[in-house]
Amino acid sequence: MREVDDALREDQLKDALSRYGKLAAVGLGAVLLALGGWLWWTEHSRATAGKAGEAFTGALDQIEAGRLTTGYAALAPWPRTARPASPPRPS
């Protein structure tokens, strides 16, 4: 009786693998590709931000050292979207 049960389970497993095996492999591959893409994107974003931060710090160092032309030229790639500070209101 036990041998029949084992043979039945083996047949059911083979049927399930033949029916859903390719789908499971494609799903696993898609998950791994998505995870790899996400990991690459986060590392790329961090590296890009690090390079931009170093360039910005270098430009500010140039300005602090009195080399205004060089410093302002290095700051040119950054957009000037911030509003200028308004003077304080008299109280």
Image (tube, rainbow, N blue to C red):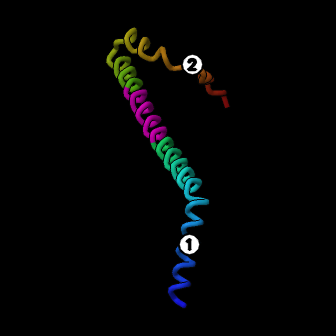
Q: Is residue 80 magenta?
A: no
| Viewer-side residue, 49 vs 59 | 49
Please state the horizontal and vertical placement of residue 86, each as a whole percent of the image: 62, 23
Q: Residue at x 49, y 41 (%)?
A: 37
Residue placed under numbered mark 1 in the picture? 11
Q: Residue at x 55, y 91 (%)?
A: 1
Q: Residue at x 39, y 12 (%)?
A: 68
Left or right of residue 67: residue 87: right
Q: Residue furthest bottom?
A: 1
| Viewer-side residue, 53 vs 33 | 33
In the image, the segment drawn in magenta is: 40-54
- Which is more N-terminal, label 1 or label 2? 1
Q: Residues within 10 Å of mark 2 (few under 14, many from 20)?
A: few
Q: Residues within 10 Å of mark 1 (few under 14, many from 20)?
A: few
Left or right of residue 57: residue 31: right
Helix, strand or loop at label 1? It is helix
Can you say whether 78 is above or below 5 in the image? above
Can you say whether 86 is above or below 41 in the image? above
Q: Which label is found at residue 80?
A: 2
**In the image, what residue type sits under mark 2?**
Arg
